[in-house]
């Protein structure tokens, strides 16, 4: 049973014998780096970088569902990329705008 599942994965059109497997697998490195940046102070988060990560995640996750064969590795890495990008952007926006407004109100 397990052998047939491994053989099916190996021979899949988006399996380990193709670039369609390895490109998204290496793309996980970007998502992992973004997870590691969660501990980075929000003032060091880059708007252009996180907008690019988020947009890439959204665009390519959609693309991965309309291609044949469906590439679920590509879909999952891009959903995670979009999620981490949105989280980083929300941290940055909160730091830059919401906390500033609260500080201004506290001064008054």
Image (spheres, rainbow, N blue to C red):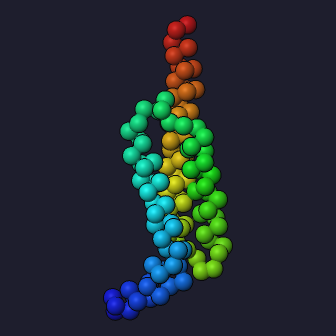
Residue drawn at the location 53% of the way across and 34% of the way down? 92
Q: Quadrant of residue 9?
A: bottom left
**Coordinates of residue 55 in the picture (x, y in percent):** 63, 52
**The N terminus: image quadrant:** bottom left
Q: Is residue 104 left or right of residue 26?
A: right
> On screen, 38 above or below 82?
above
The picture places residue 13, in percent across and down from the top left corner, at 54, 83
- In depth, the one of 26 and 60 nearer the eye is 26
Nearest the eye: 102 or 82: 82
Q: Residue, x 51% and y 12% (percent of image)?
A: 106
Location of residue 2 with respect to 94 vertically, above or below: below
Q: Residue at x 53, y 47 (%)?
A: 85
The answer to whether 82 appears left or right of 66 in the picture is: left
Place of residue 94 in the rendered image (x, y in percent of width and height, measured from the top left): 53, 31
Q: Residue furthest top?
A: 108
Quarter occupied by the C terminus: top right
């Amino acid at each position: 049973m397990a052998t047939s599942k491994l053989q099916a994965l190996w021979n899949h059109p988006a399996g380990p014998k193709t670039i369609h497997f390895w490109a998204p697998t290496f793309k996980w490195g970007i998502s992992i780096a973004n997870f590691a940046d969660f501990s980075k102070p929000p003032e060091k988060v880059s708007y252009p970088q996180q907008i690019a990560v988020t947009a890439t995640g959204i665009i390519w996750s959609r693309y991965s569902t309309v291609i044949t064969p469906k590439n679920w590795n590509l879909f999952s890495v891009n959903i995670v990329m979009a999620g981490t990008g949105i989280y980083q952007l929300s941290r940055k926006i909160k730091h830059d705008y919401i906390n500033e407004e609260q500080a201004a109100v506290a001064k008054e």
